[in-house]
Image (spheres, helix red, strand yellow):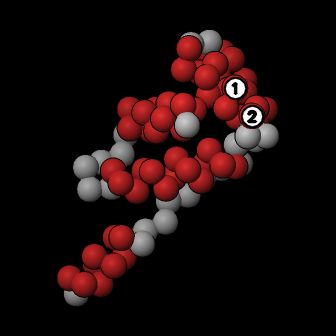
Amino acid sequence: MNRLARYLFEHIYIDFEGGIDIEEVRRMLREEDTRESRLLLSKLIEDNGIDDMMITVAECLKDYLRTGINEDVVRKQLASYSES
């Protein structure tokens, strides 16, 4: 049972529900108009969309399953992604 629980935990898959598109993300980031939001918007333009960001952030959030995922953790992952 312990091995199975560990295996499932280590192979958990995180996905985002909903159908957000690049235009909605751009609108949100432009409304906020902070340094971080402008940096992320530039990164998304460079990447030609949000697909890479969504996959990368989901993968990075797996590291926080033991300690908890909250808005601050997601915000930090978005900032990290935009600086990569």
At 55% from the left and 37% from the top, the residue drawn is: 84
Residue located farthest toward the bottom when viewing the structure as drawn: 1
Give me the residue at 25% from left, 84% from top. 3
Badge 1 amino acid: Ser
Q: Is residue 60 above or below residue 9?
A: above
Q: Are marks 2 and 1 in contact (CB under 8 Å)?
A: yes
Q: Nearer the viewer, residue 76 or 30?
A: 76
* Left or right for 60, reference 81: left
Q: Nearer the viewer, residue 71 or 49?
A: 49
- Characterize the local packing of mark 2: few (<14), some (14-19) or many (20 or more) Cα atoms within 10 angstroms: few
The reply to whether residue 81 is in sight is yes
The residue labelled by disc 2 is: 46
Q: Which mark is residue 42?
A: 1
Circle on res. 50: none
Horizontal arrangement in the rendering, residue 53 relative to residue 60 (left or right): right
Q: Can you give x and y, in whole percent of width and height, for residue 69 in the image?
A: 36, 45
Q: Residue furthest toward the front?
A: 84
Residue at 20% over, 82% down: 2
